[in-house]
Image (spheres, rainbow, N blue to C red):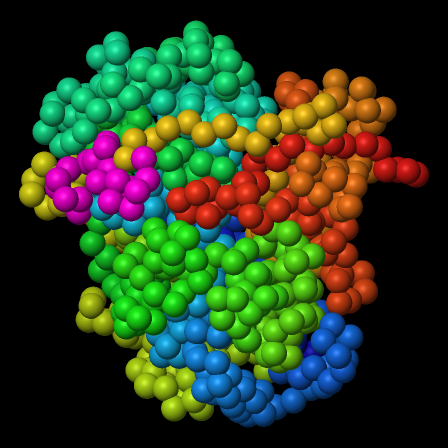
Amino acid sequence: MAVNSEEKVIKTVCSLCYCACGVLATVRDGRVAELKGDPDHPNNRGNLCPRGLAGIELLNHPDRLNYPLKRMGKRGEGKWQRISWDEALDTIAGRLKEISQQYGPEAITVAIGAGLYANVGITGYFSFLLGTPSRMHAGYICFMPAAMAVQATIGYPTPTHTTELVLGEVLNSSCILLWAANPRFAAPYPVGEGIFDVKEKGTRLIVVDPRPTDYARKADLWLQIRPGTDDALALAMINVIINEELYDKEFVRDWCSGFDELKEHVQQYPPEKVSAITWVPAEDIIAAARMFARTRPSCLCQRVSLDHSYNAIQTSRATFILTSICGNLDVKGGNLLPAPIPIKSDMGLAAKADSLPLEVLEKRIGAKQFPLASGPTVGGGFVQPFLWADAVLTGKPYPMRAMISSANNSLLEMQNTKKVWQALQNLDFSVTMELFMTPTAELSDIVLPVTGWLERDGIRGHPGFPRVISLQHRAVEPLYQRWDDVEIFIEIARRMDLDIPWQTVEEYNNDRLSPKGITFAELEGKNFITEPHEYERHKKGKFSFQTPSKKVELYSSLLKQYGYDPLPAYKAPPQTTPEFPLILIGGGKSLEYMHSAGRQIPMLRKRRPDPTIEMSPKTAEEKGIRDGDWVWIETIYFGDRERVRFKAQLVKDFHPRVVWVEHGWWFPEKPGPEHGCFESNINVVIPNDVVDPIFGSTNIRSVPCRIYKANGG
């Protein structure tokens, strides 16, 4: 007997990372049956990475959180009771009210992760309503240092030279400079693969990377740099470009200030001197500078590796100055400048928190130590995670008593993991909104189940670069009792009698679209809106540099105002010793996982089953390590007090003094509450207080270490 089957195709987007790729989700009889890339969506043109293809496994995974849970035993004991949403929300609202009244709203931290990407706006707005300046997120090592460097140069807190990989402008370039960037992992389609295509057609390719990536092997020039010395290399390239007069004289004359000071400053960084610092031959430094400056338009694409630096702000300043003086700003194939946002962006809504009274923002922990990251007058101010942990444990400068977090796995995100564990244990009250029971969720009082990307409606885009606004339409209604985190924050706010302007997720989405005079429902069947980009707007009076000089400030008045060097300078990374002779690059990513997410997904775990350490065959031979052996890592900061374990992968052409590891590793299949979060989590052996002096960014990419073969493996 034939059975009638209802089938429909929903046009949506994946939001497991920032690429916002278009997806065609086939739904049969109310269940998602198939996922394909949408060939019409400009962000991926029909392609999907493994994370997107695993969407059905994520949606239906048997270990997903499906109901609100309340802790019953001691924190971390793993005893949970299913409760109703009303009980969960009333409990949260009541406890947050109590803590706010007793200790002040600043005692409550609102934390956000990077995975779901739907919660930036609502968490910032909720912080504003709550009256707390204590927002915390991974921005201190993810794009925000680069954004601050750009703000210090052109007045906009937008990481201009980190976004071209996603936007695709790089494919219009005549010369691509990939600096600490591996597009096959960051933006695989169409850009990651497209770079190889344009290279075959004549585009020049320069790669600055310690690792022999696929791009490094194909490059016209591969500068295999010593980790943590990118600032010196950029300054040496600027030295060559200025001294050989390869810069764009017209752009520098009309649109830059501080050129004379920069010219004098970079004389300290001749290629021969910098070669000894960076391990890059002087002739290669000169050749790269000439190729980048002469082959226009050229485009510099860097990624978050430079944010993980001991000198993050000044390094990004140097690379941004490098592309600026070559006349690459807002030209086709160059580095785009921010454009007007046609809707209410996530970042714009989050910025509501910046409008709290000055005396409240001044209370933010870190405001005095890092005024450009946490101060009361900067946009997007946040609490430094290492200062937050200290405050929780010591009660100074005031007690931090509660945390409410969305898609934030702090135990895998933050450095000095065991200290973070102690801090989470020490909170009076904590709430976690999550897909799965993570190690961080295990230490919470209330755990709330959230919807995945196939169960939610939302708007995706790249703040400041709205070429494509991606629209996420739910393929199915939320399963079990999963809620959108936007809805959760709305309901908590209502129960706390806070004046939140939306009653539903639909109202929230409609409000974001209101500048375009359209509702979310009217966009059914569309998964993107395109916005045209006009080049060279600064020459047409349509773009103004928001600096005191109204120009690109090579000599930064903002940095000078706060007592920092107005010109980027080299700062030596932590040095190796005979006991710790290798340089560890932490924070590595793979195509399978978005930070700490995805280890329980069978399709992804099969592709990448183990935490990996890459090293030179020469290094391995010296240590008696073979490919596939398990290896212990210890760092100069913790010595033999802490160690973590990774599986060796020997890589040809890897520098013998450098090793590289993935971050975010835990083992969902292992018992809680730890779930193996101390075994192969590189942040266990990376301190949280060796930081960039301007922004507080943790040094992850140049950590002195030693390795040795693990017994029995």
Is 182 in front, or is 362? 362
Query: In the rendered image of this protein, does residue 525 appear above or below residue 582?
Result: below
Q: Quadrant of residue 577?
A: top right
Is 497 in front, or is 451? 497
Q: Which residue is drawn at 48% across and 74% down?
A: 107
Q: Image check: 628 left or right of 332? A: right
Residue 433 appears anywhere in the view: no
Q: Image check: 479 left or right of 614? A: left
Residue 637 appears anywhere in the view: yes
Residue 405 screen position, x and y as percent? 53, 70
Q: Image check: 143 left or right of 636? A: left
Q: Which residue is drawn at 49% across and 37% down?
A: 310
Q: How many labels does the image show?
A: 0
Query: In the rendered image of this protein, does residue 17 appear above or below residue 85?
Result: above
Please identify the quadrant where the N terminus is shown: bottom right
Q: In which quarter of the image is residue 450?
A: bottom right
Query: In the rendered image of this protein, does residue 388 appear above or below residue 321?
Result: below
Magenta-drawn stretch contains 231: no
Please identify the quadrant where the C terminus is shown: top right
Question: Main SS of the magenta segment?
Answer: loop
Q: Residue at x 74, y 54 (%)?
A: 678
Q: Image check: 156 left or right of 509? A: left
Magenta-drawn stretch contains 553: yes
Residue 487 screen position, x and y as percent? 45, 80
Point out the residue furthest to the right here. Answer: 712
Residue 22 screen position, x and y as percent? 44, 55
Q: Residue at x 30, y 56 (%)?
A: 378
Residue 143 screen position, x and y as percent? 42, 47
Is 599 in front, or is 500? 500
Numbered range of the magenta stretch: 546-565
Q: In which quarter of the image is residue 623?
A: top right
